[in-house]
Amino acid sequence: EVQLVESGGGLVQPGGSLRLSCAASGFTFSSYRMHWVRQAPGKGLVWVSRINSTGSSTSYADSVKGRFTISRDNAKNTLYLQMNSLRAEDTAVYYCARERLYDPSMDVWGQGTTVTVSS
Amino acid sequence: QSVLTQPPSVSAAPGQKVTISCSGSSSNIGNNYVSWYQQLPGTAPKLLIYDNNRRPSGIPDRFSGSKSATSATLGITGLQTGDEADYYCGTWDSSLSVYVFGTGTKVTVL
């Protein structure tokens, strides 16, 4: 079964750091671009970041550029999101998602992990 | 703020049809494929439509997508109570080099 499972969310103080993980299974992880998408409570989907299949190319939303770092370990079939200098507005459910081969749609999603930034 | 604009809500009776619009620009919808996602309450998003009008395996043909210039449309026919959800369009923006989602539309079955 194709599956993505996020972990690492939790409560963190403003200015703190957190690393999210996304464990992939059931497909050849190293062949796919991967994304992080977040959703603040009661709000819509917001794209956060994308990484290519080898990890050599990344993209970020302006709101997280310079604070968040996406990376991957293809040997461990795992995607990461290192989040530094966290702000209250980063509070959200964070989803990892697989990008389809040959087009930028996201066809497999994890269940999400919740990040709360509060003092 | 999102660069893709959707109506906040649409509604119809069971069995009827609804359409959801998604308005963008030449740098996103105008030059890239559009996808549509369904998010049922309390769950992760699910891909409904890719490449403007193609359905992944398992998505019923009651769901359809189309694109014209810088706008896209999702259609749902034979509306069912299980279709009550939030729907989002999405595409790559070539100028910004980011993926963009629409503002989201809540579908209510009356």
Image (cartoon, helix red, strand yellow):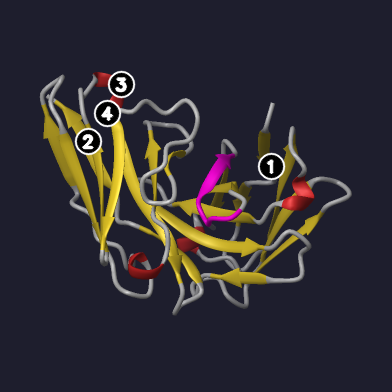
Whether the residues at callouts 2 and 3 have beta carbons within 8 Å, the answer is no
Residue behind mark 3: B82
Whether the residues at callouts 3 and 4 have beta carbons within 8 Å, the answer is yes
Whether the residues at callouts 2 and 4 have beta carbons within 8 Å, the answer is yes
Dot 3 lies on which element?
A: helix
Residue behind mark 4: B84
Q: Residue at x 77, y 57 (%)?
A: A72
Whether the residues at callouts 1 and 3 have beta carbons within 8 Å, the answer is no
Return the residue nearer the eye: A46 or B54: B54
**In the picture provided, is A30 more to the left or to the right than B2?**
right
**Which circle, 4 or 1, is nearer the viewer?**
4
Q: Position of residue B95 (x, y in %)?
A: 44, 79
Q: Residue at x 39, y 69 (%)?
A: B31
Mark 2: amino acid:
Val
Q: Which residues are magenta?
A: A102-109
**Residue A44 showing in the rendered view:** no
The image's mark for residue A56 is none
Q: Residue at x 53, y 62 (%)?
A: A48
**In the picture provided, is A43 more to the left or to the right than A116?**
left
Which residue is situated farthest in the right direction here?
A: A75
For disc 2, the chain is B
Q: Callout 2: few (<14), some (14-19), or many (20+) C-alpha neighbours within 10 Å?
A: many
Q: Position of residue B56 (x, y in %)?
A: 48, 35
Residue behind mark 2: B107
Residue behind mark 1: A7
**Residue A105 showing in the rendered view:** yes
Q: Is residue A103 magenta?
A: yes
Q: Measured along the vertical axis of the image, is residue A33 above or below residue B50?
A: below
Separation of disc 1 and disc 3 at Cα? 29 Å
**In the picture provided, is B88 more to the left or to the right than A28?**
left
Separation of disc 3 and disc 4 at Cα? 5 Å
